Each structure stands twice: as C-alpha cells, then as structure tokens.
Image (cartoon, rainbow, N blue to C red):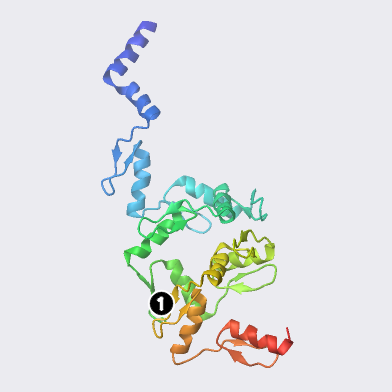
Amino acid sequence: MKGYTENKFDYGLKKGGLKNRIMDVLTEVKRFLCNICSRYFSTKSNLTVHMRTHTGEKPFSCSVCHMSFAENSALISHSKIHSGLKEFSCQVCSKCFSRKYHLTLHMRIHTGEKQFSCDVCHKDFYAQSALNNHIKLHSGIKEFCCNVCSKCFPHKSNLTSHLRTHTGEKPFSCDVCQKSFSWKGGLNRHKTVHSGIKEFSCDICSRHFSRKTTLAIHKRTHTGEKPFSCSGCHKSFADKSALTAHMKKHSGFILKEFSCDVCSKCFSTKQELISHMRTQTGV
C-alpha cells in the first residue's frame, strides 16, 4: 500500500501536478496575466480581485452604511469602524484608530515618510489610495460638476467639499475649541495646534512648527521664493492663500466676510482683520 502511495505521488511529480504547484508557491511564479494592464499574478484568485480595479466591481457591501468593497477582507476591516473600538494608539500624539493600517498611515505624518510617488509629477504621498486619487488629476477628466458655479472636479469628494463653500456648511468641529471646518482634512490639520507638538524645525532660524506644510511656507521668508503668481497683474506670493485673497481684488466685487467684534468693521481677508484688531486691542 505504501508503495502504491509513493507511485501515485511519483506519477503526480512526473505529470508536473503537485511538484509544480509547490514550486509555484515557493518561487512565487506569476502565471496569471491581466489582459488589460499586463500585470501578472501567482494565483487566479489574486487576478480576480485585481480585475475589479479595472471594472470597478465592489461585490462586498457593509450592512450598516452600505459602503462597498472589492474584497471581503476590506469589508471585515471596515466593519470595525462601526464597533467604536479604537485599540491602536499613536505613541506620539495619542490619537487612536480602529485599524492598525490606519495607525501605520497616521504615523507617516509624524515621520514625514511618503513612499508612494507619482510617475508624472513625482509628488509623494503617504498612502497608495492618496496616490491613486492624485493620478486622476493628470487624466484631465473632471466629471463631477457644481450645479451652482459649474466648476468641475475629478472626484465626487472634491465636489462635496466644494459645495460647502456655497452652503457655508462646516460639519467637522474641533472638540477642544469648537472651531468648525468644511472638510475633515482641515479639522485634522487644525488639531495639531492643540497638541502642542512642534516637531518640524527650521534649519535657518530654529523656529518650530506643528505642520510640515507650515514649515515649507515659512522657509520662503528666508529664500524669498514666491511660487504663486497672479494671472492678472503677475504679483507673486509665498503661499496660495495669500494669492487667493489677492485675486478677490480683481473680481470687481470684494467680499468682506471677516468682521471685527469691537467696531463691526469688515475685511476681505483674515490677515487684514488680525492687523486691524491689534489697533483695537493695542497688542
């Protein structure tokens, strides 16, 4: 009986069945080809999952929020969000997350690690998903259009955030100072102000900042760099917000949305209001 088993096994080896399957696993042979992007996969199931990135198919749906996913494992991971359990904590700022993967992405904010790079403009990102969204910008396709001002966007999320500039809606509120924001990213950036952590240091004047982007803008005060230029008068600015405020002067109608609590005088930019407040308070 033993000999029969061995012969049967040998027969399998001669036919290339079991031996080839074992060798495929050990050497990670990728024999399944995607006929769209020519990428190879070691198993048919991996190819099936990959094909959904081309077809957009997301057969696994959350029973709570109805969000859909291409893989069952992604749905299982997502479901933890609804449990309210956040067992993964950041050792730097103590922020907690429901998934270890989200903590890993968050940690890159502190380390500055951006391992995903765009082949077109070489901009770097913390996560593959962020890179995927960015790549759509290079396609030039903007299929999501605002029904108020007709401005179009490459992503539906961009349009959703934009619509709040018309409605004034600010659904994301800081639990420390109650300041509200129109998009979650703005709230997340704001929260670093309350943490007190300023890990980004200027190598010229040693001034510290809580955000890397703020440090980059600050450094332009040393270099004199002004990369944002007005298309109307060609005046240049060190940061985009200053250019945006400046462009309002060319619009023919200057919206003065920043009001002084002391004398009720209004200003078109927040910086003008801050300067004015100093004359009122003597600070």
Which of these two is toward me, 184 or 191?
Answer: 191
Q: Residue furthest right?
A: 282
Number of marks: 1
The quadrant in which the C terminus is found is bottom right
The residue where tag 1 is placed is 146
Residue 243 x %, y %: 48, 79
Identified at 35% across, 58% down, the residue is 120
Is residue 47 rendered to the left or right of residue 179? left
Which quarter of the picture shows residue 144? bottom left
Residue type, label 1 = Cys
User: 256 above or below 188?
Assistant: below
Which of these two is toward me, 264 or 207?
Answer: 207
Identified at 54% across, 48% down, the residue is 101
User: Considering the numbered disc 1 on the image, is that residue within a helix, a strand or a loop?
Assistant: loop
User: 237 above or below 112?
Assistant: below
Residue 170 x %, y %: 57, 74
Residue 2 x %, y %: 39, 7
Which quarter of the picture shows residue 132? bottom left
Q: Is residue 166 visible?
A: no
Q: Is residue 49 visible?
A: yes
The quadrant in which the N terminus is found is top left
